[in-house]
Amino acid sequence: MKISRNTKLNDLLNRYPFLVDFLAGLSPEFEKLKNPVFRRTMGKIATLDKVAVLGNMEIDGLLSAIAREVKAQTDEELTIITGEGEEQPLDAEARQEILKYIIRGVHEGEDMEVLKKKFRELIKDVDPSEISKMEQTLIDEGMPESEVKRLCDVHVEVFKESLEKQEIPEAPPGHPVHTFMMENREAEKIMTEIEKLLKRLGEEPDETVFKDTLGGFGRLLEDLKKIDFHYARKENQLFPFLEAHDVAGPSQVMWGIHDDIRALLKKASEELSQEEPTAFVKTMKKLLPTTREMIYKEEHILFPMSLEQLSHKEWKKVRKGEEDIGYAWVRPESPWPSRPIPEEVDRAPIDMVPGPKKIFLAEGGLSQEQVNLMLTHLPVDVTFVDSEDRVAYYTASKHRIFPRSPAIIGRHVQKCHPSKSVHIVEKILNEFKSGTKDTAEFWLQLEGKFIHIRYFAVRDSDSIYRGTMEVSQDLTEIKKLEGEKRLLDWE
């Protein structure tokens, strides 16, 4: 048999199975060959020159060692072909397997510089879509989203040199990506001002300086909190369209980091109001780098990948739904696309007939306009999820408590929640479907408001589960009511 740098490892192991144990003795990296799954994936696509890089060996030394072992075990002479052309380019499957191999090394605590070296020698460059696909595959193969999220910054660090060679995406004014990037520039300005104040405080915060800067920190922190609009548009507008292209895992990972940033913002505000300078500085030293890293991931991974994946028609839908959620610090610079976006036909339920014709209900009848007006004037937010767990409707009132946009229509409700709470959503739905529960309720404090959230199982006259209705209400003022106020007291 002839062997060269371009010989596939899998071909060699199929012919000489004893080489698995032999290679494992040459390098700790080759211990993985004892794993059948690893052999079926990496072994199938890796050539010996790639195997040498993985084992931190020279290719000529590896070929000679293999030839000697085969001779010793079988008395067969292998012919080593040297200088066999250029190394073979990796196909998409091979690149994905090697990317996953490198990232698994991150999770196993392998030295960062060693991993960067392997990446440079094995892959050299990386496309943003490849990173998203890799994360999605790792999640599909069983790696918890929480673990992918935990080491997300480390993943980016491995690929940073390659990512920085690529141009930052450009989009026309008014395009959602253009607006996202404008918001990022504003966020950076605010964070720079915060960093200036932190520098004045010093490593060991000076109490006097802290009191002098309280007002400045307070104003800047409140301004930075507007980034929530930026994240809400990603979660409710951009992510649903990516999910339609089977890009769900990375979106959930990023959503989890959004929640971390929100929690840090809240924590910093509390520490500021309680005048705890040491704790405040510690929190800010987590918040600012995490927020800046998110900007980097958006502009080097998420936005380029999204521009590649989404069609012009899909971007139009993203743009239209943005108005329902709002913007952070800026608004789109100009209309996009230049012509008005027509109403989407699929926005109206198929059984709703426009015009004065009535929709006959259990008692009485209403026109489509009346139904819509009545629902949007309710003093509560209502969302309906059908029996297949897809969002079918929400009340598009002007003052919603939680943001909603047209992009969530048809989306699985599980995707509308961060990964840390999905198991609770699943539990509620399962209880409703089995008939063991009919309601679930929660309440929370949100920006000084007392919010009551209730879920109701919706069943037909035969007690068959037809969906779930979510009702959210601001009870802040209602809780203050005392005594009574009758109809005749109204003025």
Image (cartoon, grey):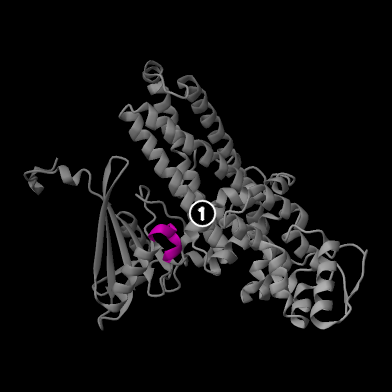
Q: Which residue is mark 1?
A: 149
Q: How many numbered circles does the render carry? A: 1
How many residues crowd around disc 1 within 10 Å: few (fewer than 14), some, or many (20 or more)?
A: many
Residue 419 lies left or right of residue 189; in this view the side is left
- Placement of the N terminus among the 4 image quadrants: bottom right
Q: Position of residue 4 (x, y in %)?
A: 87, 70
Label 1, secondary structure: give it: helix
340 or 201: nearer the viewer? 201
Q: Is residue 7 magenta?
A: no
304 or 424: nearer the viewer? 424
Residue at horizontal 38 percent and vertical 59 percent from the top: 421
Q: Position of residue 136 (x, y in %)?
A: 58, 63
Residue 279 lies left or right of residue 71; in this view the side is left
Q: Is residue 417 magenta?
A: yes
Which residue of the protein is positioned furthest toward the front in this rendering? 72
368 or 377: nearer the viewer? 377
364 or 261: nearer the viewer? 261
Q: Position of residue 466 (x, y in %)?
A: 33, 76
Q: Report the span colored magenta.
A: 413-421
Q: In which quarter of the view is residue 215 placed?
A: top left
